[in-house]
Each structure stands twice: as structure tokens, then as C-alpha cells.
Image (tube, grey):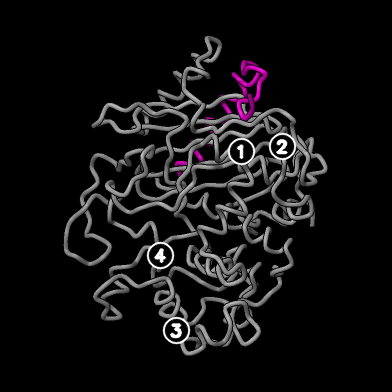
Amino acid sequence: MAVCLLAACGSGRKGEGPRKEPVVLNETLTNEMSDTVSLEKMDRKIEAYMQQWQLKGASLAVMRNDSLLYAKGYGWADEAKGVTMEPYHIMRLASVSKLITAAGVMVLQEQGKLSLRDSVFGECGILGKEEYASSIKDKNYYKITVEDLLRHKGGFTSGAGDPMFSTRSIMVNNRLDTPPTSDELISIVLRRRLGFVPGTSQSYSNFGYLLLSKVIEKVSGDPYEDFIQKNVLRKAGCMDFHIAGNYYSDRYPNEVRYYVPSNEEPVQEYNNSGRLVTRCYGGNDITALSGAGAWVGSVPELAKFVASIDGKHDMQNIIEYESVEEMTLYSDDKTYSLGWNDTNPAIGWTRTGTFSGTSALIKYFPDGECWIFVTNTSTWKGPALARKTAALFSELRRNYSSEFPERNLFFK
């Protein structure tokens, strides 16, 4: 198997990095800082792309070798209130959250508190015998390792629906009056037989990353959000990440409004209330996704997080170089990397995220340039929109990469 590390990687030892003073990005960056005459045509291309896919708002960050060159918002953060998108606005990141969770697992491994080879269930498992033993009937559960969950090889399939997006049916089938807690949901799902023997195949699993959130809690002794904030995000200089709420009224002060396609019909509220709601506000229990998809953050801070796990010496890394190698190890196009969707050395590292009201793409290219684009609008293309955005990145890189100013907005 080949190790995928992008060009110009440094030693990645902790403590290394620029001596300049870092800024608090969401208190500093504005669109005006990236208004550049030479990039006006690029802006128009992005605006045309947004119009094509009816995207209300979007945020773009471009980083090269851990230097933030460009950070700009487009369209509306909240159209009804007349608030335009700025780089400091935070948005739901959907499955990009899995990359954050994976980094948390690597931190715990470096601390000697777990190994990727550790069993998750069973008498010697992290989520030990006492927690869920009464639910497990399929002995293949005892074969699941931490690495299996990271690589979507835990044996979970979506044949009975994705349990993270099936709250109403789970409530009905289990005669619940309220949505299940995470522990209740895990116990319910563990009663099912696995779709395949762990480690022998793969099937994308949000539920697997909920289990990883529980693993982090059990091993660290802290709530998932608290551990990640303290040991991952804040160490990376990301001060404004949070676990998302489900409704517009739950939003953070600088959080955007989310939008669905104009022709999408209302859906029943996730908690089986019988109310009809806009899918992005109450159609699903976003908060319950936890480490599988619940983080909100700004695109520039997301770029800084990526810079902290890429192994280059230009920015202080929050994980050791060996952990970067492990996360980005590339086997083949049929094997998920750790937290990343794909780390093919020929095309770079990719992480996507999509659900109602959100589409996100991180594309880290082999030449060290990283483009991140997050929208506050979902489209009928669903996850396939990421491919369209990747094609847009390729076009924009080809025509405008040389026009970016040589600077680093991460620092004063």
C-alpha cells in the first residue's frame, strides 16, 4: 500500500509553525479583505455557479501551503434579514464533521488511551460488555474495531434506512413517545444483524461515526463536544465551532439561515409531532448526529483545521506526522481513508458533506493548494453536487491560481 502525503510536507512536529501572531478569524476577516480586481472574473464565475444551482449563499476559502490566501462569502447569509454572506459566518458542515471526529480519535491514540485496532464491543471492548451486551445477538459485533468504524467497514448498511435520519420510524417501531437518546438509539440498532462481517467490505455509515463519538466520550471521560473543542479545534486555532441546533431559533449569533430547493414540499417533523416543517429545520435531528455530521463552523476556520492535520511545518499540527500518514494512507479507490473520503495521491485529499440545507467540499490538491466551499442551500443533486463543485475548482484553479495575493490571512 502506498502512503499518500501531499507535496511539500514538513516534519509536522508539535511546536513548529510561524512566529507571527495568529488572529481570531471570525472576528477579523471580511469580504473586503479579499476584494481583488484581478479576481473579479472568478467572483462572477462563482456567482454564475450559484445561480445555476439556486444557491442562496456560499463561502469560499483558498489556502496554499498552509497560508490562507482568500476568504470570501457570496450571496445571502439570511436573505429575509438582508444579511449578506461574510467569511465569518458559520454553517452546518454535515459529514465534514467526520474529519474532525477522526482527528479526535488520532489524538486519543497519541495519548495512549486507545488504538485503532481496539475492539469496540465485547468484554474487552471500549464500549464494554455492560453497556450494550443485552442488545447484541449477532456475535460479529465483537469483531468491530475502531479502524473499521473510521473506514465505514463496521458492517452497518442502510437496508433498513439510515438510523441517523429515521427518527420517526424508529419512534413508531419501538413505541417511543420522544426521540431516542443516543444510548437508546445505539441499543435499538445493535439488535439488528450486521450486513457483512466487519472489515470484509464497506458501506458508508453515519451510525458508525455516532459510535466513534461514544468511543471518544468513554475513553476521554468528557462529553464528545467538550473533548473535541479542547483537544482538537481550539488547539488548531478554531474558536467558533459548535454542535448544531435543529431549528432556526437554535442558531448561533453569526450562523446563517438554511434553504432547500424552492419546489421541495414540507415534511413531517422528526419528533413525530405531526407538524409539517421545512426539511432543514426540524425534518431531521441534526444535533443527534454528533460526530457524524453535527458541527457548524466558518470556512476560514475549517481551512485552519485542515492546515493543522496536513503534516506540513508551515502551521503547527495538532497530531504527529505519523498520525497524518495513518489518516491519509491510500490503499485503493474502494477503501475509505480515516475521516477523509479519499486520499488518492494523484488527485489529492477529498472530504464532502451534504444534507438538507447544506453542501460542503474540501479539496486538498497534490500541489499543496486547498479549496473549501460550503453552501447554506441544498439542491436536487444531493451529494452529487460535490462533483460539480470539484469541476468548478479545477476550472478556477486553472484560470486564477496565479492571481491570488501572496499573504497569509491566518496571521497579522
Q: Are the residues at dot 2 and dot 3 in contact (C-beta closer than 8 Å)? A: no
* Residue 46 located left or right of residue 80: right
Residues in magenta, as a range: 384-412
Crowding around mark 3 (Cα neighbors within 10 Å: few <14, some 14 to 19, many 20+) is: some
Q: Are the residues at dot 1 and dot 4 in contact (C-beta closer than 8 Å)? A: no
> How far apart are the two marked residues, 2 and 4, measured between alpha carbons?
35 Å
Q: Are the residues at dot 2 and dot 1 in contact (C-beta closer than 8 Å)? A: yes
* Rendered location of residue 198, percent (x, y): 61, 75
Crowding around mark 1 (Cα neighbors within 10 Å: few <14, some 14 to 19, many 20+) is: many
- The tally of labels here is 4
Inspect the image, locate mark 2, and give the three-letter code of the amino acid beneath it. Met
Q: Is residue 337 magenta?
A: no
Residue where numbered disc 4 is placed: 164
* Rendered location of residue 206, percent (x, y): 48, 62
Tell me the mark number nearer the camera, choosing from 1 and 4: 1
Q: Is residue 397 above or below residue 358?
A: above
Q: Specify the farthest residue to the right.
A: 11
Q: For residue 191, which numbered disc appears in the image? A: 3
Mark 3 or mark 4, earlier in chain: 4
Inspect the image, locate mark 3, and give the three-letter code of the amino acid beneath it. Arg
Q: For residue 315, which numbered disc appears in the image? A: 2
Is 88 in front, or is 361? 88
Q: Residue at x 59, y 30 (%)?
A: 23
